[in-house]
Amino acid sequence: MNKRIVELQERIMRIRSALQLIGDMRPGVLSRQGSAGKEYFQVSYTHKMRSRTEYVRPASAARVKREIQAYKRFKALTQQWIDAALELSKIRGKEGL
């Protein structure tokens, strides 16, 4: 079997394993709003082609930030999976596998 095929298959397996470890996630950008004494946070995102903005309590800001980071990790991993899968498919097509 082609060495590159094995490498790609192993990479896809590592990506799958990493995806299983991702916990709660959400899309968006978290920003601090307001002035001293009246600070609050907003999370803005687009979902199903609709822009949304939600208010976030300061006590929840750290959790929301972690969820946004998890979503970014999810997106990066799925893009890597797609890239590897496309390359794998092209190699198999050329080799008639």
Image (cartoon, rainbow, N blue to C red):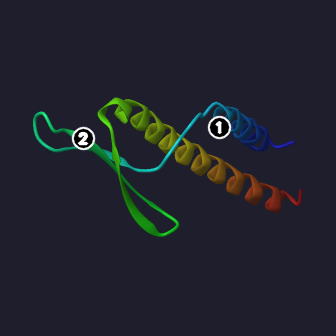
Question: If the image is split into quadrants, where does the N terminus sit?
Answer: top right
Q: On the rendered structure, is 74 left or right of 53?
A: right
Q: Position of residue 47 (x, y in %)?
A: 49, 62
For marks 1 and 2, give the CA distance.
31 Å
The amino acid at mark 2 is Tyr
Q: On the rendered structure, is 56 left or right of 14?
A: left
Nearest the viewer among 25 and 75 is 25
Q: Position of residue 95 (x, y in %)?
A: 84, 57
The amino acid at mark 1 is Leu
Residue extending farthest to the bottom is 49
Residue receiving disc 1: 19
- In percent of the image, x 48 and y 38: which residue is there? 67
- In percent of the image, x 81 and y 62: which residue is there? 93
Residue receiving disc 2: 40
Question: If the image is split into quadrants, where does the C terminus sit?
Answer: bottom right
Sequence-wise first label, 1 or 2: 1
Q: Nearer the observer, disc 1 or disc 2? A: 2
Q: Secondary structure at mark 2?
A: strand
Dot 1: within a 10 Å radius of its alpha carbon, few (fewer than 14), some, or many (20 or more) residues?
A: some
